[in-house]
Amino acid sequence: HRVATSLTKQHLPFAGLSRDSAAPSPHFDVVVIGGGHAGTEAAAAAARCGSRTLLLTHRVDTIGQMSCNPSFGGIGKGHLMREVDALDGLCSRICDQSGVHYKVLNRRKGPAVWGLRAQIDRKLYKQNMQKEILNTPQLTVREGAVEDLILEEPEPEHAGKCRVSGVVLVDGSIVYAESVILTTGTFLRGMIVIGLEMHPAGRLGDQPSIGLAQTLEKLGFVMGRLKTGTPPRIAKETINFSILNKQTPDNPSIPFSFVNKAVWIKPEDQLPCYLTHTNPKVDKIVLENLHLNSHVKETTRGPRYCPSIESKVLRFPNRLHQVWLEPEGMDSDLIYPQGLSVTLPAELQEKMITCIRGLEKAKMIQPGYGVQYDYLDPRQITPSLETHLVQRLFFAGQINGTTGYEEAAAQGVIAGINASLRVSGKPPFIISRTEGYIGVLIDDLTTLGTCEPYRMFTSRVEFRLSLRPDNADSRLTFRGYKEAGCVSQQRYERASWMKSSLKEGISVLKSIEFSSSKWKKLIPQASISIVKSLPIRALDVLKYEEVDMELLAKAVPESLKKYTQCRELAERLKIEATYESVLNHQLQEIKEVQREEALQLPKDLDYLTLRDVSLSHEVREKLHFSRPQTIGAASRIPGVTPAAIINLLRFVKTTQ
Ligand code: FAD
């Protein structure tokens, strides 16, 4: 017995797929709703797994649209992209065809926490993504707004749960499906805000999804409301770049995708970014006009890590805040002022911009705006992203309370794989916290939920020294190939070659011993600490900052030269050597926390003022409000990092 949750309309076959109204309604294995960053990955992943897939979205020409920042990657986010790529996902490859400024963040820290990042040409990204999606075998793409779901009534063999079996479009037509994935981003009852004006929209220029939000509510899903915002866009030619700090891209550029040796554009042809700052005049405009700014007054939670200029001024008054002026594309006349997300009335935004150094004569082309939208409490989904309430219905992306393209893409690929596996009756594909950032993201969402837009950070990850961007293929590609069938033969073979070369290289490096004379010949100015520990294995020599595979191969060419032929292999051997002993140390820390799970935290501990322990402001706030009784309870508070836990544990033990 199939029923739509709203039984008011006459249902017809979906006109987008059949012109004949008498034809039976089309039937797909997987239907994906939404062509954003989650939807494109979900649809492509389901198709790669062999499912006949339909991607239904409002407009084909907005597939792959970057709603906010013209950049991909960053700290924690770059890791997610590498993992999506390891599962043969799209966003990393598409970025390597569309980037205009590549820069690795966190360079001064170890490669485990490097943040691969690039400014992306919005237009190119969309074009390249649409080309990819429209040419994916097994994938059909159609325009249409989904309004309702078709459900099969609960049956005993389905544990009394109802099951989704199709979707109803706004014109009443229907498409049947074995699994359905919702990836509707900020569109559920989306409301755009500028100053005191509000109007319904999923993002600027796009209709919101109201019917679908009502359907989900009727089905009994718990929903909440979140908000985010975007900065104004500025005419490039009106900015005085000559007085600002210029940031040039890295040379060479590090590609996002494992399958790419280089990106499409040479570093010397890439575009620069520029840095400027806010000043007290900006604070004054914000503070004097709070009464004209309904988005700021709203109690709905906004993104903590990508705050509006209003929240920054209110939380950290009298500070100069960074504003990065980022290119929107190779032939774009627009500049994106990152850090200046704002919802003041448009004329005040323009006034505020012209107070900033370098922007004195700047012309605003499009005002910044805020968006408020419904999200679903992600504790209503399982680690495979299927809902507890309705069988074969999956949610992925911003609908689950996350923010960011990369978080959306990561969920998309997992939902696509699992929706497909569900159809073929295979076990779900789940990534654990010890296997990947994707595992941490999904575990945090499904077990702890979120009441503010969730973004990925390296600090959320317990095992970050082993979950590195360089080794995402060793962690996930083989599982993706064997268990999900979402990885191509070519990628699998490449990952296999890398895995066996690394294994062999490490074993050779362990077998070579460096004596004092050999070492001194290699680096005459070798530090005393190295000399003292001689003789040591070549693997240990490679740990030192001043040593790389090239240098070692000069000393022992007969054994090591072959490992320098491939730049990526040589770099990965260096990283493996760097982390060998640190990983052992991490293991000890994990055991220490596990042993002390039950350690009681003093009831009178004032986390906000506590001096002798290193804790971030965010962690202090969270501990202050949650007041956990034990170390174990503290470690389960969202946002309280493993590093903070070990610091707190040691502090409490020394004061006992
Ligand atoms: P989206 O990219 O929003 O895609 C949703 C898709 O679903 C669209 O293609 C839409 O047409 C389609 N759709 C919706 N409803 C239906 C329906 N009923 N039927 C058919 N198709 C439908 N992220 C940050 O990291 N930092 C920021 O500062 C930031 N600011 C933002 C500001 C604004 C104004 C907006 C709109 C977004 C912002 N984001 C920001 C979020 C970022 O854009 C999203 O995290 C990301 O795009 C989410 O991807 P998604 O696939 O979940 O949804």
Image (cartoon, rainbow, N blue to C red):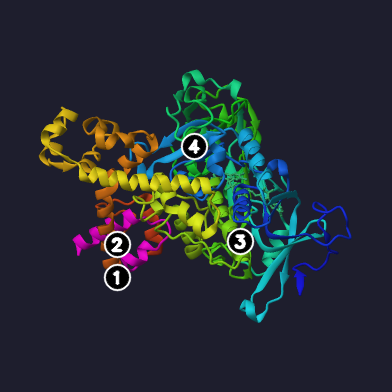
The amino acid type of the residue labelled 4 equals Asn
Mark 4 or mark 3: which is in front? Answer: 4
Q: Please state which of residues 524 and 152 is positioned toward the viewer in this rendering.
A: 524
The amino acid type of the residue labelled 2 equals Leu
Residue pointed to by mark 2: 605
Binning the other alpha carbons within 10 Å of mark 3 as few (below 14), some (14 to 19) or many (20 upward) gives: many
First along the sequence among labels 3 and 2:
3
Mark 1 or mark 3: which is in front? Answer: 3
First along the sequence among labels 2 and 1:
1
Binning the other alpha carbons within 10 Å of mark 2 as few (below 14), some (14 to 19) or many (20 upward) gives: few
Image position of 470 (left or right of 613): right
Residue 298 visible at all: no
Residue pointed to by mark 4: 260
First along the sequence among labels 4 and 3:
4
Q: Could you tell me which residue is drawn at 57 percent across and 34 percent down?
A: 98
Q: Which residues are magenta?
A: 628-656
Residue pointed to by mark 1: 598
The amino acid type of the residue labelled 3 equals Ala
